[in-house]
Protein backbone atom coordinates (compact mmCIF):
# COMPACT_ATOMS: atom_id res chain seq x y z
CA UNK A 1 0.00 0.00 0.00
CA UNK A 2 2.59 2.62 1.07
CA UNK A 3 5.15 1.30 -1.39
CA UNK A 4 2.73 1.75 -4.29
CA UNK A 5 1.64 5.25 -3.19
CA UNK A 6 5.21 6.45 -2.64
CA UNK A 7 6.37 5.05 -5.97
CA UNK A 8 3.34 6.20 -7.99
CA UNK A 9 3.30 9.71 -6.52
CA UNK A 10 7.10 10.14 -6.15
CA UNK A 11 6.74 11.17 -2.52
CA UNK A 12 8.91 10.82 0.55
CA UNK A 13 7.38 9.34 3.70
CA UNK A 14 7.37 11.35 6.93
CA UNK A 15 6.01 10.00 10.21
CA UNK A 16 4.80 12.44 12.85
CA UNK A 17 7.44 12.41 15.58
CA UNK A 18 5.24 12.38 18.68
CA UNK A 19 3.46 9.04 18.27
CA UNK A 20 3.96 7.23 21.57
CA UNK A 21 1.47 4.36 21.56
CA UNK A 22 2.60 0.99 20.28
CA UNK A 23 0.60 -1.99 19.05
CA UNK A 24 -2.27 -1.81 16.60
CA UNK A 25 -3.21 1.85 16.25
CA UNK A 26 -5.21 4.03 13.90
CA UNK A 27 -3.27 6.78 12.20
CA UNK A 28 -3.99 9.03 9.25
CA UNK A 29 -2.24 9.30 5.93
CA UNK A 30 -2.30 12.87 4.63
CA UNK A 31 -0.88 14.56 1.56
CA UNK A 32 -1.04 18.18 2.82
CA UNK A 33 0.25 21.09 0.75
CA UNK A 34 3.76 19.76 0.09
CA UNK A 35 3.55 17.60 -3.06
CA UNK A 36 6.79 15.79 -2.19
CA UNK A 37 5.71 14.35 1.17
CA UNK A 38 3.22 11.73 2.36
CA UNK A 39 2.59 12.35 6.06
CA UNK A 40 1.58 9.80 8.71
CA UNK A 41 -0.12 11.78 11.49
CA UNK A 42 -2.25 11.15 14.61
CA UNK A 43 -5.77 9.84 14.02
CA UNK A 44 -7.36 12.89 15.68
CA UNK A 45 -6.15 15.17 12.86
CA UNK A 46 -8.90 16.74 10.75
CA UNK A 47 -7.32 15.74 7.45
CA UNK A 48 -6.25 12.49 5.88
CA UNK A 49 -7.41 8.91 5.43
CA UNK A 50 -7.51 6.62 8.48
CA UNK A 51 -5.24 3.57 8.33
CA UNK A 52 -4.74 0.69 10.76
CA UNK A 53 -1.12 -0.19 11.47
CA UNK A 54 1.13 -2.12 13.79
CA UNK A 55 3.13 0.77 15.26
CA UNK A 56 6.46 0.51 17.07
CA UNK A 57 7.40 3.68 19.03
CA UNK A 58 10.80 4.78 20.31
CA UNK A 59 12.21 6.53 23.37
CA UNK A 60 15.71 7.78 24.15
CA UNK A 61 18.15 5.10 25.36
CA UNK A 62 15.43 2.45 25.11
CA UNK A 63 14.62 -0.55 22.98
CA UNK A 64 11.14 -1.72 22.01
CA UNK A 65 9.89 -4.59 19.91
CA UNK A 66 6.67 -5.79 18.35
CA UNK A 67 5.79 -9.26 17.06
CA UNK A 68 3.97 -9.28 13.73
CA UNK A 69 1.73 -12.26 13.02
CA UNK A 70 2.23 -14.36 9.91
CA UNK A 71 -1.06 -16.27 10.27
CA UNK A 72 -4.53 -14.68 10.39
CA UNK A 73 -3.05 -11.28 9.63
CA UNK A 74 -5.73 -8.63 9.95
CA UNK A 75 -3.60 -5.47 9.91
CA UNK A 76 -1.20 -5.58 6.96
CA UNK A 77 0.90 -2.46 7.56
CA UNK A 78 3.76 -1.92 10.01
CA UNK A 79 5.35 1.45 10.84
CA UNK A 80 7.95 2.65 13.31
CA UNK A 81 9.20 6.09 14.23
CA UNK A 82 11.58 7.84 11.83
CA UNK A 83 15.24 6.86 12.00
CA UNK A 84 17.74 9.63 12.70
CA UNK A 85 20.32 7.51 14.50
CA UNK A 86 18.33 4.52 15.81
CA UNK A 87 18.73 0.87 14.88
CA UNK A 88 15.97 -1.40 13.60
CA UNK A 89 16.26 -5.20 13.71
CA UNK A 90 14.05 -7.82 12.05
CA UNK A 91 14.00 -11.57 12.70
CA UNK A 92 11.74 -14.59 12.47
CA UNK A 93 11.13 -15.98 15.97
CA UNK A 94 10.43 -19.63 16.87
CA UNK A 95 6.61 -19.32 16.77
CA UNK A 96 6.86 -18.10 13.14
CA UNK A 97 6.07 -14.46 13.89
CA UNK A 98 8.30 -11.63 12.75
CA UNK A 99 9.88 -9.59 15.55
CA UNK A 100 10.82 -6.00 14.75
CA UNK A 101 12.93 -4.04 17.24
CA UNK A 102 13.64 -0.32 17.41
CA UNK A 103 16.62 0.62 19.58
CA UNK A 104 17.90 4.06 20.43
CA UNK A 105 21.27 4.78 21.97
CA UNK A 106 22.09 8.31 23.03
CA UNK A 107 25.68 7.46 23.96
CA UNK A 108 28.74 6.50 22.00
CA UNK A 109 29.11 3.21 23.92
CA UNK A 110 26.79 1.23 21.63
CA UNK A 111 28.87 -1.65 20.30
CA UNK A 112 28.89 -5.27 19.06
CA UNK A 113 27.84 -6.58 22.50
CA UNK A 114 24.58 -4.62 22.23
CA UNK A 115 23.79 -6.28 18.91
CA UNK A 116 24.71 -9.71 20.28
CA UNK A 117 22.45 -9.18 23.31
CA UNK A 118 19.56 -8.18 21.04
CA UNK A 119 19.98 -11.22 18.79
CA UNK A 120 17.47 -13.17 20.91
CA UNK A 121 18.90 -16.57 21.70
CA UNK A 122 21.03 -16.97 18.60
CA UNK A 123 18.25 -16.27 16.10
CA UNK A 124 19.99 -13.96 13.67
CA UNK A 125 18.45 -10.54 13.52
CA UNK A 126 19.12 -8.40 10.47
CA UNK A 127 19.81 -4.76 11.23
CA UNK A 128 19.31 -1.39 9.63
CA UNK A 129 21.72 0.95 11.41
CA UNK A 130 23.40 4.34 10.95
CA UNK A 131 26.92 4.00 9.61
CA UNK A 132 28.36 5.74 12.69
CA UNK A 133 28.23 2.41 14.57
CA UNK A 134 30.73 0.68 12.30
CA UNK A 135 30.57 -2.73 10.71
CA UNK A 136 28.61 -5.59 12.27
CA UNK A 137 27.34 -8.87 10.86
CA UNK A 138 23.90 -8.87 9.20
CA UNK A 139 23.71 -5.09 8.90
CA UNK A 140 22.62 -2.62 6.27
CA UNK A 141 23.48 1.05 6.65
CA UNK A 142 21.06 3.88 6.08
CA UNK A 143 23.58 6.68 6.14
CA UNK A 144 25.05 8.96 8.72
CA UNK A 145 23.47 10.38 11.80
CA UNK A 146 21.28 13.26 10.73
CA UNK A 147 20.49 14.79 14.13
CA UNK A 148 16.77 14.84 13.32
CA UNK A 149 16.97 16.34 9.85
CA UNK A 150 16.27 14.23 6.79
CA UNK A 151 15.22 11.01 8.54
CA UNK A 152 15.05 7.54 7.05
CA UNK A 153 11.65 5.81 7.28
CA UNK A 154 11.21 2.07 7.79
CA UNK A 155 7.98 0.14 7.26
CA UNK A 156 6.57 -3.26 6.41
CA UNK A 157 3.66 -4.56 4.35
CA UNK A 158 2.09 -8.01 4.49
CA UNK A 159 1.51 -9.27 0.94
CA UNK A 160 -0.84 -12.11 1.87
CA UNK A 161 2.02 -14.58 2.38
CA UNK A 162 5.03 -12.74 3.87
CA UNK A 163 6.01 -9.51 5.54
CA UNK A 164 8.15 -7.36 3.24
CA UNK A 165 10.14 -4.49 4.69
CA UNK A 166 11.37 -1.30 3.10
CA UNK A 167 13.27 1.81 4.05
CA UNK A 168 13.30 5.14 2.30
CA UNK A 169 16.30 7.44 2.51
CA UNK A 170 16.01 11.24 2.32
CA UNK A 171 16.74 11.18 -1.43
CA UNK A 172 13.35 9.38 -1.93
CA UNK A 173 15.04 6.08 -2.86
CA UNK A 174 13.12 3.08 -1.52
CA UNK A 175 15.21 0.03 -0.61
CA UNK A 176 14.09 -3.54 0.07
CA UNK A 177 15.19 -4.79 3.48
CA UNK A 178 15.90 -8.53 3.52
CA UNK A 179 15.72 -10.52 6.76
Image (cartoon, rainbow, N blue to C red):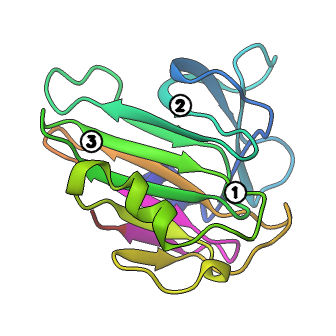
SS at badge 2: strand
Residue 1, visible in the rendered structure = no
Q: Nearer the viewer, mark 3 or mark 2?
A: 3
**Local crowd at mark 3 within 10 Å, few (<14), some, or many (≥20)?**
some
Does the magenta-highlighted stretch encompass residue 77?
Answer: no
Q: Which mark is residue 64?
A: none
**Viewer-proximal residue, 111 or 6?**
111
- Quadrant housing residue 40: top right
Of label 1 and label 2, which has the lower sequence position? 2
Q: Which residue is mark 3?
A: 98
Does the magenta-highlighted stretch encompass residue 173?
Answer: yes
Q: Nearer the viewer, mark 1 or mark 2?
A: 1
Q: Is residue 102 shown left or right of residue 30?
A: left
Q: Is residue 12 above or below residue 19?
A: below
**Residue span colored magenta:** 165-176
- The residue located at (21%, 35%) in the rendering is 97
Q: Which residue is mark 2?
A: 55
**Viewer-proximal residue, 53 or 96?**
96
Q: Is residue 145 shown left or right of residue 13?
A: right
* Residue 26 percent coordinates (x, y): 57, 18
**Viewer-proximal residue, 142 or 5?**
142
Of label 3 and label 2, which has the lower sequence position? 2
SS at badge 3: strand
SS at badge 1: loop
Q: Could you give the CA–CA distance between mark 3 and mark 2, rounded to whole angstroms?
A: 14 Å
Of label 1 and label 3, which has the lower sequence position? 3
**Local crowd at mark 2 within 10 Å, few (<14), some, or many (≥20)?**
many
Q: Which residue is mark 1?
A: 105
Question: Which quadrant does the C terminus fall into?
Answer: bottom left
Q: Could you give the CA–CA distance between mark 1 and mark 2, rounded to whole angstroms?
A: 20 Å
Q: Residue furthest top?
A: 44
- The residue located at (45%, 77%) in the rendering is 140
Amino acid sequence: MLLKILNDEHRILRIYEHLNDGGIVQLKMARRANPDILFIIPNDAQEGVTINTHFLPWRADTGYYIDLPTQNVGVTLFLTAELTGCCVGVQRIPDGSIRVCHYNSQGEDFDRSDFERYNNGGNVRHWLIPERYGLFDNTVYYGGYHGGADPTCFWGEFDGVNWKFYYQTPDKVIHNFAY
